[in-house]
Image (spheres, rainbow, N blue to C red):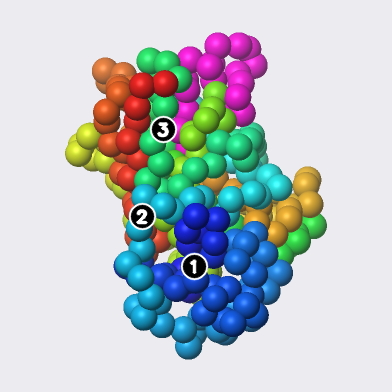
């Protein structure tokens, strides 16, 4: 099942067309994408016999963030072996956690205002919590996951590293710095979240080309670890880290400029296309 947010309403989609969840179900289900988690299994059952192709062509420019109002957005730093190697940093012993404040979330085609001259890209798998998770074992972690989507952890490196210790959360939470989507794919349709191809193209040039199998801490390990510290709520997001190829560790360094298109894609989950504009 793929669930998108079209102008604030939950829409079932096949990736091309979509039908309004509330209307097509005779108002059995809420139109609010945030209400989907409380009825997740029922909606999946309904979606199995629904036909998105009978609806209208999806206007991607009108899609909002597939999870518009999570209570929290967790993000993991340095979670890819290839990225740790290119940055010349040791592999961490436990996940490095920061937050992207939820006000930075935008849809898959949103324009992103540049906040300065050191704005960087980070393609990421985003995990969406489906059920409350409090001290969950790794073995049962996926029972608490609704699905996954593509995320772009846009980062202002100047703001991030201006202070010591660094300000990860502030440098990564500016307006529109959290594109997600294009829709939420339910876990049963994700395949193996720990082994998906992922890419990031900037102005048509491939910058990141990796697999989630490069992750140091797996999806189940991250859910279990985070749930041992915080109570994870339905709809909460986990940005699981980025692979090699970000601009700040390239030789020479490469940052985004106005007019450039960033395309972020994960196998089976879809693609974000975000244009960066003058801030
Ligand atoms: Zn990141």
Q: Which quadrant of the view contains residue 118?
A: top left
Q: Which numbered disc flags the more N-terminal residue, 2 or 1?
A: 1
Q: Name the residue under label 2.
A: 60
Check the image and report above or below for 82 versus 13: above
Secondary structure type for disc 3: strand
Check the image and report above or below for 55 versus 177: below
**Across the whole image, how many numbered discs are drawn on residues?**
3
Q: Which residue lies furthest to the bottom in this view?
A: 49
Nearer to the camera, 186 or 62: 62
Secondary structure type for disc 1: strand
Few, some or many C-alpha atoms within 10 Å of disc 2 (few <14, some 14-19, many ≥20)? some
Q: Name the residue under label 3.
A: 112
What x and y, as percent, mark residue 34? 64, 59
- Ligand 1 within 8 Å of disc 1? The answer is no
Nearer to the camera, 82 or 223: 223
Q: Which residue lies furthest to the top in this view?
A: 163
Secondary structure type for disc 2: helix
Residues shaded magenta:
153-170
Taking the spot 54% from the left edge, 61% from the top edge, the residue there is 9
Q: Mark 1 points at which residue?
A: 11
What x and y, as percent, mark residue 263? 31, 44
Taking the spot 38% from the left edge, 75% from the top edge, the residue there is 55
Quick check: can you spot residue 48? Answer: yes
Magenta span includes 155 = yes
């Amino acid at each position: 099942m793929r669930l998108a947010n079209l102008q604030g309403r939950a829409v079932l989609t096949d990736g091309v067309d979509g039908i309004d969840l509330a209307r097509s179900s005779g108002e059995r289900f809420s139109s609010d994408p945030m209400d989907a988690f409380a009825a997740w299994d029922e909606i999946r059952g309904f979606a199995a016999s629904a036909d998105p192709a009978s609806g209208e062509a999806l206007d991607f420019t009108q899609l909002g963030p597939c999870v518009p109002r999570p209570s929290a957005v967790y993000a993991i730093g340095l979670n890819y072996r290839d990225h740790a190697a290119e940055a010349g940093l040791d592999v961490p012993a436990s996940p490095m956690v920061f937050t992207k404040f939820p006000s930075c979330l935008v849809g898959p085609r949103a324009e992103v205002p540049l906040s300065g001259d050191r704005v960087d890209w980070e393609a990421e798998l985003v995990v969406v919590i489906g059920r409350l998770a409090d001290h969950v074992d790794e073995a049962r972690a996926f029972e608490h996951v609704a699905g996954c989507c593509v995320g772009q952890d846009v980062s202002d490196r100047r703001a991030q590293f201006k202070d010591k210790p660094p300000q990860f959360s502030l440098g990564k939470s500016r307006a529109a710095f959290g594109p997600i989507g294009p829709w939420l794919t339910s876990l049963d349709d994700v395949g193996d979240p720990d082994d998906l191809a992922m890419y990031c193209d900037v102005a048509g040039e491939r910058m990141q080309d990796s697999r989630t199998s490069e992750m140091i801490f797996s999806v189940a390990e991250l859910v279990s670890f985070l749930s041992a510290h915080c109570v994870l709520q339905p709809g909460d997001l986990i940005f699981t880290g980025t692979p090699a190829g970000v601009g700040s560790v390239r030789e020479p360094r490469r940052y985004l400029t106005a007019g450039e298109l960033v395309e972020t894609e994960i196998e089976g989950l879809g693609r974000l296309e975000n244009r960066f504009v003058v801030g």
